[in-house]
Structures are given as C-alpha cells and as structure tokens.
Image (spheres, rainbow, N blue to C red):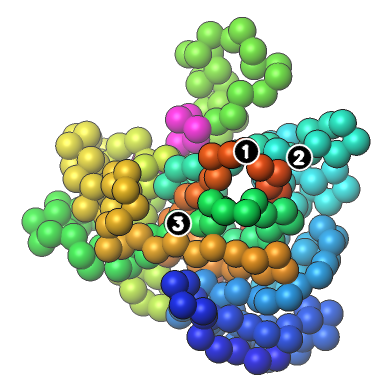
Amino acid sequence: MKMGAPTAGRRGFVVEGFDHTSATEAEISEIRDRIYQDKVVVLKNQQIDAAGLVQLGARFGELVGYYEPIYQHPTEPLVFVSSNVLHGGKQVGVPKTGAFWHADYQFMPQPFAFTVFYPQRLPGQGRGTYFIDMAQAYAGLSADLQNLLDGAIAHHSVRRYIKIRPEDVYKPLGQLIDSVEEKLPPQSFPAVFTHPVTGERQLYVSEAFTFKITDADGNDLGSELLRRVLEESGQLDPTFEHPNIFLNTYELGDIVLWDNRTLIHRALHNPSNSPVESYRVTALDGLPLYQME
C-alpha cells in the first residue's frame, strides 16, 4: 500500500495498491487517521462488486443502511444506489440524488462518521462532488456570528428534500410532510461542536436539512441568523467560487472515503443526463458525534 498527495485540483489523500481483503489492521487504522486529518481519502484502481464494497466499508466501522428501500441495492441493502440507468428494464436506486448541501444522515438520531463512495458509471464531463470543510467554515465566520452561535442548537429535518415515492402521488403536501416527520422526527445538535478526534471546532449546519437555529432554551434565533450562517459558510453561492468550496472529480476505479462529521457536500450533476451510477456505504466509528463540552 502506497499513500501520497492527490493530483492537481483535488484535495485529500491518495492510496495506491490497496486491497481490503489483505489490508492489515495497521493499514486500515492509518487510512482511518487520514480520513480524520485530511478529510478525504481516495483508494485508486479498485475493482469490487457491491458485496465487496460492504466488506470494505465494514473494516472502517459499523455500517448503517439507508432507511428508504427504494435507494437500496437489490442484493446488498446496505449499499445506497444513485442511478439513472435501467437494469433489466427496471430502475435500481434513485436518480439525481444529493444536489444540495448536506451531511449524510444529519436528520437522523445518530449521524455516521464515514461515507464510502464508489462511482460505477461516469459521464464524459460534469460529475464530481463539491465539499465544504465546516471547521474551516467556522474559523472564517465573522466574530459576531461566532458569538451568536455560542451555545446555539441547530434543528434538522429531511422534510425539504424527501423524494416522492410512487405511493405518495396525489397525497396533499402537508400530509406527506407529516408522515415523513412521524417516521423521522426532527433532530437537534449543537450548531457548533468539537470534533471527537481532531479537536477542531466546526459548524454543523446545512442548507438542505437545517430548518432553524435556537438558543439553549429553545427560543428561535430567527431565519436571518440561519441565512447568514449559510451565506458566510459558502452554501448560498450559486457560482461555487466561495473560498470554502472545493471540488473533487473522479475516475472509474476510485473509492472515495470522507469524514461525514466535518464535510458537507453536494453532487455536481452533468446537464446532459448521460448514464451515471454510484454506490455508497456509510459507517459509524464507535465515537459520539461530538466531544462533550
């Protein structure tokens, strides 16, 4: 196994010659440490199937499947499938996922630590992932905004971006939202917390899932505060040129692991609707989401 710097225009750490079936615990631990420190690790030249991806992901922690069956791989339910490709005339997974700023499972009681992303088909151009390092974003906030967020609580829900399932057609919007939040009640976490491994102070707020920020007593701090946080962190920049934003593109054979606590992300989708497909597994690391103050 050989580790090195990424190619020009990308961030993170690159690993050559990795084989999850023969990797030692020391090598897995080294990669895990790199995920925490460098935020992104790319395993190059991987040729594994969905079952192999599950086996690989399990070496980094306890795998957590997506709660909606329509996203699941037909034989490996722990694998999340994003695809616009028909298999045997049938849709597998869901097309055009993730085109909004978010941390995966931010709306769940136990958001996970690691995302393991494996592209299966790539278009000729226009496919990749935008990221924001939320420790960097917090450090760059204006001092008054940092003070306003001290002790604040961010509240998260999937209500804005839930995908409409076939059985949801013709349901009133209010009924659909109520049914979603009955199944997935909103979750609350500190708007700013300390990473349990790196010790970095970071934001935990996203455009997709954060619907309000309150003080410690539950008093709503207002939509303008949330808007300022999203704007200063870079999440409202339609040009993606904000200094907090970086883009990683991929090659077939890349498996990309990232720190889901610290990075928020959104997909870069190609406008041509060329065939595109990816697999993903997600893992807990046995640590709390954040370090208790």
Q: Quadrant of residue 203?
A: bottom left
Q: Position of residue 71 (x, y in %)?
A: 71, 40
Residue at screen point 30% across, 56% down = 241
Please indicate, yes or no, whether residue 54 appears anywhere in the rendered image. yes
Q: Nearer the viewer, mark 2 or mark 1?
A: 1
Three-letter code, disc 3: Tyr
Q: Main secondary structure of the magenta part?
A: loop
Q: CA distance from mark 3 to mark 2?
A: 23 Å
Label 2 sits on a secondary structure element that is: loop
Residue at screen point 63% across, 54% down = 124
Q: Is residue 163 left or right of residue 121?
A: left
Label 3 sits on a secondary structure element that is: strand
Disc 3 designates what residue?
A: 130
Please indicate, yes or no, whether residue 137 appears anywhere in the rendered image. no
Three-letter code, disc 2: Val
Q: Which residues are magenta?
A: 155-161
Q: Is residue 223 above or below residue 78?
A: above
Specify the label residue 85 is tagged with. Answer: 2
Q: Earlier in the sequence, mark 3 or mark 1?
A: 3
Q: Quadrant of residue 66?
A: top right
Q: Earlier in the sequence, mark 2 or mark 1?
A: 2
Q: Is residue 154 above or below residue 55?
A: above
Specify the label residue 190 is tagged with. Answer: none
